[in-house]
Image: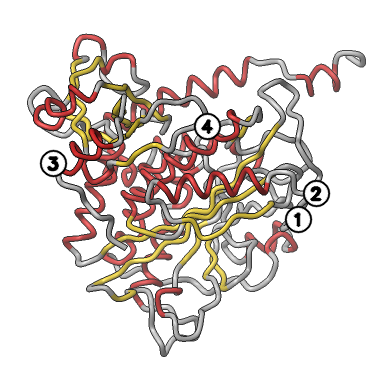
Amino acid sequence: MKQTTLSTDEIRDIVAREKVKTVWLWFVDLEGHLKGFAMAPSELDRSLEAGMNFDGSSITGFNAIEESDLTAFPDIETFSLIPMMDGEEPAARMFADIMTPGGKPFAHDPRHVLRRQLARAEKLGYTYYVGPELEFFVFKSMELPPQPLDDGTYFTSPPVDMSSALRTEIMTRLNAMGIDVEYHHHEVAPSQHEIDLRFTEALRMADSAITYKYVAKQVAHCHGYYITFMPKPLFGVNGSGMHIHQSLFRSGENAFYDSEDEFKLSDCAKSFIAGLLKYAREITGFLAQYVNSYKRLIPGYEAPVYISWSPVNRSALIRVPAFVPGKTSSVRCELRCADPSCNFYFAFALMLAAGLKGIENELELESPVLENLYGLGELEREKRGIKSLPSNLHEALHCIKRSEFVREVLGDEVTEQFLELKYREWSDYQMHVSEWELKRYFSVL
């Protein structure tokens, strides 16, 4: 599933032939928000040769003002035309690798963080594949409170599902940009939807997931609607998650597959899963990075909160989907606690690093939990040693703060920047007086 790489001459030819008016250079900040700037085609040659300088001090989690100069170097492997919306001029985009004035990779660049872990996997002979399932809501507008378009449920079809055509347009535009989509459907909650990307290498997938969110929001905007990837925008219904399927390949073969095992899992796969379970609490703050993320991570709404694994069982943190006979590539593990508001580059880097730690240290995988975990009492879970994920952002940040593993993967500076940013968010949340508090206490206290 390698992406065809264009040469710089081919990129120039496409820009000229398609009469491209602007070329965007994209990257993300510390939280994974899309950032970028557009340049005229006349600047393309200069950007390809020397990069484009910009002020990094205004980017969340990047440099301080006294050391703000950074350079964005286009990654030509990511060149793509952007499908035009009504009234738009032809445009293209490339993701950029961020460099320091000295020509070194910028340590705070999330793409660089993921590249480091992928290089580590490559040294061990592995290629890391991921396939995320991004869920989202479609609302009538950005106005609050949110107004759903329909009352559909899981796999509801039109006309009750009022966004099927919208999803199809998003899928078509993603396909036009070289991003493979498996299928799309209505999700469990009213006006909730899912478009699944076909699994591919992790760096390309992170770029594709950023593009997915951009295209989805743009298409919705053109139709007068609003798409949000907020984890829990509506009370009393399921939130939006991002189940992440993952596997390692070696020499073109699935390293997770073992024909003799009951679950078709190799020792490599079992140790990888054991690593994910071991470091789950330490990385949750990156997989679910907002206060709102933990309004989704509660029992009863298909969001796993108990650290365990299981074949098929969807109440476990890690699920091993059923093996498809004759298809060895189908053997994988699915981590189910992440949500689509995360920084994909950090999330993939930390999951890969956790799995590789499990392999390197030959961690043994505990027995699977076959029962519905929501049906087990707290004493039974405690007796069986089943721990829980952090219950709120503050607890998740405490786990990160104490984690040598996270600092090893991200570096001290990035870790401290992330903690500072998120502790401010938690402080703001604590000071806020919510509508729930007013309704509960105002008239009775």
* Nearer-N-terminus badge (4/2): 2
Q: How far apart are marks 2 and 3 (CA)?
A: 49 Å
Residue closest to the far top: 66
Which residue position holds label 1? Answer: 156
Which residue position holds label 4? Answer: 218
Local crowd at mark 1 within 10 Å, few (<14), some, or many (≥20)?
A: some
Coordinates of residue 46 in the picture (x, y in percent): 12, 25
Image quadrant assignment for residue 70: top left
Under mark 4, the amino acid is Gln
Coordinates of residue 40 in the picture (x, y in percent): 25, 21
The reply to whether the C-beta atoms of the residues labelled 2 and 1 are less than 8 Å apart is yes
Under circle 4, the secondary element is helix
Residue 124 seen anywhere in this rendered image of the structure: yes
Q: How far apart are marks 4 and 3 (CA)?
A: 30 Å
Q: Residue 160 carries which label?
A: 2
Image quadrant assignment for residue 55: top left
